[in-house]
Amino acid sequence: MVFSGGTGYARFAVWIHVSPGERIIGFWCVPVMQNSEITRLFEELADLLEIQGENPFRIRAYRNAARTLGDLPESVSQIVADTTRQLEDLPGIGKDLAAKIQTIVTTGTLPQLEELRSVVPAGVVEMLRVPGLGPKKAAALFQQLQVTSLAELKTQCESGAVAKLKGFGAKTAQSILEGLAHLEQAGQRLYLAEVEPLAEELLAHLRRVPGVTRVEAAGSFRRRRETVGDLDLLALASDSAGVMQALAGHPAVEKVLQQGETKQRVRLKLGLEMDLRVVPAESYGAALQYFTGSKDHNIVVRQRAIERGLKLNEYGLFRGETRECGATEEEVYAAVGLPWIAPELREARREFDWAISGSLPTLIEPGDLKGDLHMHTTATDGAGTIREMIEAALARGLKYIAITDHSQRVSMANGLDAGRLRKHWAEIETIRADYPHIHVLKGIECDILEDATLDLPDDVLAEAEWVLAVLHYGLKQPAAQITRRLMTAIENPHVDAIGHLTGRLIGKRPAAEMDLPAVLQGMAQQGKWLEINAHPARLDADDLTVAQARELGIPVVINSDAHSVQGFEVLKYGVYQARRGGLSAADVMNTLAWGEFHRRLQRRRRADH
DNA sequence: GCCGTTTTCGGCCCGACTGTTTTCAGTCG
């Protein structure tokens, strides 16, 4: 059995091993490390080694390991504690790194890291965040000018000392100053939903430029990641200077940072940077494939090219000096023995296994959604009335919705107690009779309280036609308690689905810590459905969790969490997240026509009683 | 530091742009 407790950094668990005769035979304490903390330590180690001028492949091994651990669905601490498991079975983890992980998990740190930290101050590592400053220059600044902080770096640039260093110069010093200024005011990744309207606008702008045949966005934007760090556009044009000039002249562009024959880099007023690449037609597919990434995906694709005696770059696929193909992505993938892979899957996770075995999923499309099972009205914190929300849903072509206002615990949002909720439902019943072309479910977004009870009694929940159970408060509780709360909801027969599973707000609030494999296992066993909350700041569950839900056969619903009639607009971001998790329409319950959806829901509910 | 349908050593994806050089290193994606 496992107990865990404590808060903040020093988090401890006690494993008590009990023999068949219930006698305690072992007892010890180990710090429970979040995977993200181990990832952070390995990334820091890689940065430090890079500044030290270490073997780049060794550094990459650390970064690969960090990624492997970051993508891992289960806790590394648990694998370490489990004597039947081997860290070395994980990709990119060998004997050496397994031992280092073991050390980190059991001691909370790594002697090698401590030693490096004593040689290279934290401020030097911080300099790597300055655009244009890499490990070599950071090391030179530290060794030759004793710069150990961003503040000192600024001073030394302004004094002219940096410009005098060998390999530096006036322009380098100036670009460091600009990089420092940029770091202060921006540097954050933006939500996909914040970038998408501008990206569409820029694409439309460039498509109007004479001589431009095609323009598309690549990069993390095309992969539909939750956030976008910079934007990559690819153009097929007869006159590259003309396209670049057109982009530079767009009012959204603040400054041209670089410009060459084929590549232009600009800073947008929105705060992010953007690359424009102009490529010839015969290279367009290879370039689109290349600039879409991810980097890890491309490494695998290029490796496959090498195995076949080919070389792949953004200009095409070459055998010696001869171009074999490159005009379309399809022919590039085909040449390395793969079917075309949807951009959302290109993260070097499962897509190559699927592609090779012929089991790539046909991904869900935004147009597949027929219902929305999470929205609010003026009864709590929504801006639209029941009628307004129904009419807005109808206008979007939705065939069924659930009205899910807050339960009483969410007092700030005027949450509903049993009495108000029953009146609210009675009102929904009356109003829905006026709308024969859409089915409206009497629902509730019921809080899972800090003490692992539900915010409304079972007899009330039993009257609901759709119950979404969610965490809003106490998100910083220890993982064991969060897990217990979720298990309570999962085991309650009236709960249909778990909404915004971890409560995270991207870039603002971390996900609640929990035993995710246990929670998902519980959901699979109890037949509960998992919500993908389409709000651009939530997108919770994330892509990795969604992928695990898919493997466990947990049905998914994609919901808007609309708080106004405009709130349905975000549904597509939920669909993107589902695509990144590898979901087909068949995996998502609210792609079903009403009749089939209703039968599935009733079957789920009967199975629970 | 990892890894192996050319296996236990010798590889590890590839090119654009910039600045400081005088043929290239550093940074970035």
Image (tube, coloured by chain):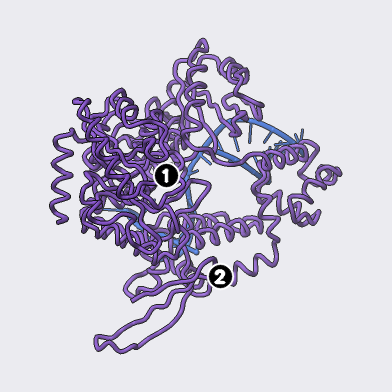
Chain colours: A purple, B blue
Query: Hey, what amino acid is under mark 1?
Result: Asn
Pointer 2 local density, CA inside 10 Å: few below 14, some 14–19, many at least 20: some
* Residue under pointer 2: A109
- Secondary structure found at label 1: loop
Query: Can you give x and y, in whole percent of width and height, for residue A489 in the image?
Result: 29, 57
Query: Hey, what amino acid is under mark 2?
Result: Thr
First in residue order: circle 1 vs circle 2: 2
Pointer 1 local density, CA inside 10 Å: few below 14, some 14–19, many at least 20: some
Q: Quadrant of the C terminus of chain A?
A: bottom left
Give the farthest residue toward the right. Answer: A159
Query: Can you give x and y, in whole percent of width and height, for residue A175 in the image?
Result: 73, 37
Which chain does the numbered disc 1 sit on?
Answer: A
Q: Residue A414, labelled with which disc?
A: 1
Kindly report the distance in space between the C-alpha atoms of the residues bearing marks 1 and 2.
Answer: 46 Å
The residue lying toward the viewer, choosing from A346 and A239, is: A346
The residue lying toward the viewer, choosing from A471 and A259, is: A471
Query: Can you give x and y, in whole percent of width and height, for residue A163 in the image?
Result: 82, 42
Residue A343 visible? The answer is: no
Query: Can you give x and y, in whole percent of width and height, for residue A500 in the image?
Result: 37, 48
Please, is residue A251 above or below residue A566 in the view? above
- Secondary structure found at label 2: loop
The residue lying toward the viewer, choosing from A607 and B19, is: A607
Which residue appears at 44% of the width and 30% of the height? Answer: A288
Q: Are marks 1 and 2 on the same chain?
A: yes
